[in-house]
């Protein structure tokens, strides 16, 4: 049997770094929630499967969230592995461990309902986009609003779910509820746009592009900057909340890494990544700011227009 931490390490380097900063029980809740979203994302990315099989798997996964043995999880997970929806060893391990993950999910008490609600929302949204793929499994987004709808489905909803979990931990943050909820989906959208810009050339070589042909790359950079500024506002609001140190660090670190990645991609082109040394420097700076009671976000939150 694997562990949640091992599953995180094989599916996301960034979240494997940031989630352990969270206090318990939020840390356990977010580990489980992230991995559930990752399963849905695996099926949405399974272009080697026929469109109908992707949709079937998403529906099967949604039914599993109904109860401890929803939909016969063990048997279905075995079939997913036999059919190998994706080539990534870490994601295959995650699918194999679906029953283990569901067991942990149904132990989360008050966090079960918000996690299930948002996971099903992203499953429903992903199903809409899968239905739009062509016979070669390619999704062709129409324009910038369509790109934003896609980013909301796969990442913006994550921001909304995390916000609900933070409210469970810190009900006093509800005094800033409208401010935080306005920025939560932009936080997720910004991180997703940075990934799209970073992987632009690779995706084109693989025969896919998440950016509509009529959208200029400069416009995507501008939107990413706008969203990351909203994410900075969100995080500084948590810091002044005050939310616990670990919650603030969990939010600040991906923003700072996304800003650094965006700068590097803009300067050196798609495919550029920040080094491990740069990541260590960002972690050190954020921890130092928390020690000193200083704002954790380096850039002043002056949101550029889009």
Image (cartoon, grey):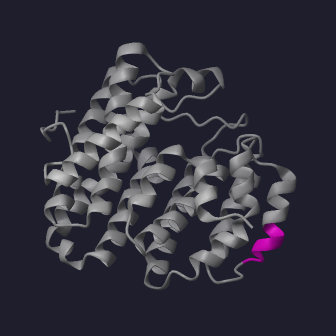
**Relative horizontal placement of residue 210, taking residue 301 as reference (left or right):** right
Q: In this view, does 92 lie above or below 139?
A: below
For the residue pair 94 and 54, the one nearer the viewer reads as 94
User: Can residue 186 be seen by looking at this rendering?
Assistant: no
User: What residue lies at 34% left-to-right and 35% top-to-bottom?
Assistant: 281
Residue 196 place in picture, x, y as percent: 47, 32
Q: Quadrant of the C terminus?
A: top left
For residue 124, above or below residue 150: below
Furthest residue in direction right, as rendered:
82
Quarter-wise, where is residue 214 in the image? Answer: top left
Q: Residue at x 58, y 27 (%)?
A: 203
**Magenta segment boundaries in residue numbering:** 71-76
- Nearest to the observer: residue 204 or residue 274: 274
Closer-to-camera residue (105/154): 105
Q: Taking 21 as reference, is 292 left or right? A: left
Q: Is 280 inside the magenta-drawn segment?
A: no
Q: In which quarter of the image is residue 171?
A: bottom left
- Tell me which secondary structure the magenta stretch mostly adopts: helix
Report whether 177 appears left or right of 47: left
Q: In this view, does 209 lie to the left or right of 63?
A: left
Residue at image location 14% in from the left, 54% down from the top: 293
Q: Where is residue 268 in the image (x, y as percent from the top left)?
A: 41, 14
Residue 249 to residue 115: above or below: above
Rendered location of residue 160, percent (x, y): 36, 62
């Amino acid at each position: 049997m694997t562990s949640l931490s091992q599953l995180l390490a094989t599916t996301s380097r960034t979240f494997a770094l940031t989630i352990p900063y969270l206090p318990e029980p939020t840390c356990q809740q977010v580990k489980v929630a992230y991995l559930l979203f990752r399963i849905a994302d695996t099926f949405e990315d399974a272009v080697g499967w026929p469109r109908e099989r992707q949709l079937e798997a998403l529906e099967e996964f949604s039914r599993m969230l109904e109860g401890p043995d929803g939909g016969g999880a063990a048997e279905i997970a075995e079939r997913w592995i036999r059919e190998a929806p994706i080539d990534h060893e870490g994601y295959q391990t995650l699918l194999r461990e679906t029953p283990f993950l569901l067991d942990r999910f149904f132990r989360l008490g008050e966090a079960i309902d918000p996690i299930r609600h948002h996971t099903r929302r992203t499953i429903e949204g992903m199903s809409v986009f899968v239905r739009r793929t062509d016979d070669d499994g390619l999704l062709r987004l129409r324009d910038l609003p369509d790109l934003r709808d896609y980013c909301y489905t796969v990442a913006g909803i994550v921001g909304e779910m995390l916000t609900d979990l933070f409210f469970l931990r810190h009900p006093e943050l509800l005094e800033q509820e409208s401010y935080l909820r306005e920025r939560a989906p932009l936080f997720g959208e910004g991180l997703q746009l940075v990934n799209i810009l970073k992987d632009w050339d690779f995706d084109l070589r693989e025969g896919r592009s998440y950016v509509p042909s009529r959208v200029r790359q400069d416009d995507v950079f501008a939107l990413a900057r706008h969203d990351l500024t909203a994410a900075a506002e969100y995080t500084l609001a948590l810091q002044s909340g005050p939310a616990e140190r670990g919650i603030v660090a969990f939010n600040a670190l991906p923003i700072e890494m996304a800003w650094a990645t965006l700068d590097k991609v803009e300067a050196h082109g798609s495919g550029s990544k920040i080094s491990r040394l740069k990541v260590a420097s960002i972690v050190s700076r954020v921890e130092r700011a928390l020690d000193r009671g200083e704002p954790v976000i380096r850039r002043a939150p002056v949101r550029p227009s889009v």
